[in-house]
Amino acid sequence: MNCDDVKNDLYFYIKNDIDLPTKKGIEEHIEKCSVCKELLNEFSKTLRVVDKCYVKVPSKNWDYFAEKTMDKIHVKRIYSFLRPTIGFMACVLIFAFSYRYYQLQKLQTITYVPSTEETVSYLVDFDIPELNE
């Protein structure tokens, strides 16, 4: 056996849920390989800590609890597209209003161009001899 094989079967070896030839192969490899021996020790410690953790499953209304939990998971998945969509629409609206505001400001900065009648009345007020003839 090599180190990869031992790593793949280490959990089953610790839980004693492995066939005898594989178990002997792992034991032989662990005697020779210090890295796998250290891995076995660390993994055993971790599994002991995990096994000590006790998760209390609610005895009453377990089906109701599981059903409501699954409903919440599926509802979140169904409406998960709304948040990015609303954000995108808000960005589009901000851009549109900003562009419109910019265009209005640009129009206000354009110099005033008088109408033709105003220009004629302005020029008539001057005494220009060439125009009086």
Image: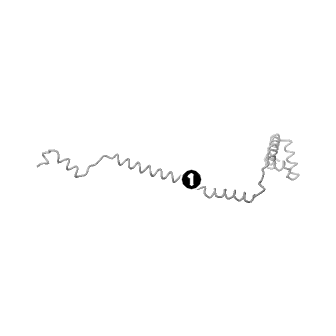
Q: Is residue 65 above or below residue 13?
A: below
Provide the residue designation for mark 1. Answer: 84
Taking the image as shown, residue 56 lies to the left or right of residue 73, namely right
**Location of residue 76 in the rendering, given as x and y in whole percent from the top left corner:** 63, 56
Taking the image as shown, residue 91 lies to the left or right of residue 70, namely left
- Name the colouring of the figure: one colour
**Location of residue 103 in the rendering, given as x and y in whole percent from the top left corner:** 39, 49
Front-lying residue, 52 or 106:
52
Front-lying residue, 67 or 35:
67
Front-lying residue, 131 or 127:
127
**Location of residue 112 in the rendering, given as x and y in whole percent from the top left corner:** 29, 47
Taking the image as shown, residue 100 lies to the left or right of residue 67, namely left
Q: Residue 61 falls in which quadrant of the image?
A: bottom right
Front-lying residue, 8 or 14:
14
Taking the image as shown, residue 91 lies to the left or right of residue 46, namely left
Q: Amino acid at mark 1?
A: Pro
Residue at point 44%, 51% (across, down): 97
Seen as rendered, the residue at the extreme front is: 60
Q: Residue 109 falls in which quadrant of the image?
A: top left
